[in-house]
Image (cartoon, rainbow, N blue to C red):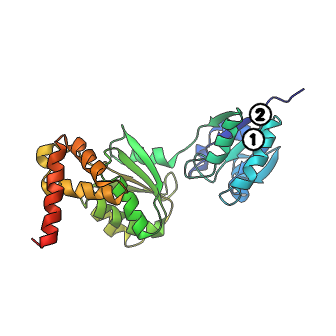
Amino acid sequence: MTTAPGTLVLAGTPIGDITDAPPRLAQELAGADVVAAEDTRRLRRLTQALGVQPAGRVVSYFEGNEAARTPELVEALLDGSRVLLVTDAGMPSVSDPGYRLVAAAVAKDIRVTAVPGPSAVLTALALSGLPVDRFCFEGFLPRKAGERLSRLKEVAEERRTLVYFEAPHRLDDTLAAMAEVFGEDRRAAVCRELTKTYEEIKRGPLEELAAWAAEGVRGEITVVVEGAPVRGADELDADELVRRVQVREEAGERRKEAIAAVAAEAGIPKRDVFDAVVAAKNAARTGA
């Protein structure tokens, strides 16, 4: 006889206010065979606040041990266990541990389900005052300045609203880099301490927000940035066409591909973009 595979449950946890915890979270915590937590100390505080005691085994599952612990949890699932995965705040696998375990479970045809819960991404997006019909989540930017600029340049012409996580001590540098790449007037919102006592939503152009953040900001930060404006071909001068090509080249595209992509975005012949790039190159060579 073989044991039917168990179930992997991804459970969202409060991002601030503990009363935002869904009722099912307490039920799953009490009934799971194994509870895998990003931080077992935080899990203890959460269970105490919810008035529940996990009956199953509690193990840690964080960035430093997820590669080694994933096979162990998959074995438990194959043996028929119900494994509950929780992270410190929000939904597992969204800039938190979880993806590796989900992928491994799916590969073994193990059922994966979720207890929906609070999300800093969606909460910040809804409160930002920026378009929400189309958006993309970019997670954390690289810590090094050069790598951060390169990553931002990759999405400089992205028309969807952008959502980022950022550490408070890097916020001013990040906003300044965004102003440099996206433009000082691009609208954004800095969402701080969402659902907590000192929740704050600061909205404005990137240049203004960067100056504000330079004075020092604390707490958990989510940044929402307006997508690139849609501009007609008549609004794009030669310098702007060249800039767009350069952005794509710096992001790793070959010049031919970059020129074709910019031409398609602007709705103009590739020859027009090519001529603008050649003219700019000749001007730079002669110092004109």
Identify which amino acid the numbered label 2 is placed on. Gly
Q: Residue furthest top?
A: 1
> Quick one: 107 or 216, which is closer to the camera?
107
Q: Residue at horizontal 28%, vertical 45%? A: 261
163 to 284, vertically: above or below: above
Asked whether disc 2 touches disc 1, contact meaning CB atoms under 8 Å apart, the reply is yes
Q: Residues within 10 Å of mark 1 (few under 14, many from 20)?
A: many
- Which quarter of the figure is the N terminus placed in? top right
Q: Is residue 90 left or right of residue 75?
A: left
Identify which amino acid the numbered label 1 is placed on. Val
The image quarter containing residue 267 is: top left
The image quarter containing residue 66 is: bottom right
Q: Looking at the image, how many numbered discs can be counted on the residues?
A: 2
Of the numbered discs 2 and 1, the one sitting upstream in the chain is 2
Name the residue tied to disc 2: 6
Q: Which mark is residue 83?
A: 1
Q: Residue 176 at what x, y percent from top left?
A: 33, 67
Check disc 2 and report its element: helix, strand or loop: loop
- Which quarter of the figure is the C terminus placed in? bottom left
Instruction: Inspect this view and state whether residue 61 appears.
Output: no
126 to 3, vertically: above or below: below
Q: Residue at horizontal 58%, vertical 44%? A: 20
Q: Is residue 38 left or right of residue 16?
A: right
> Quick one: 53 or 75, which is closer to the camera?
75
Marks 2 and 1, how far apart in space? Answer: 8 Å
Check disc 1 and report its element: helix, strand or loop: strand
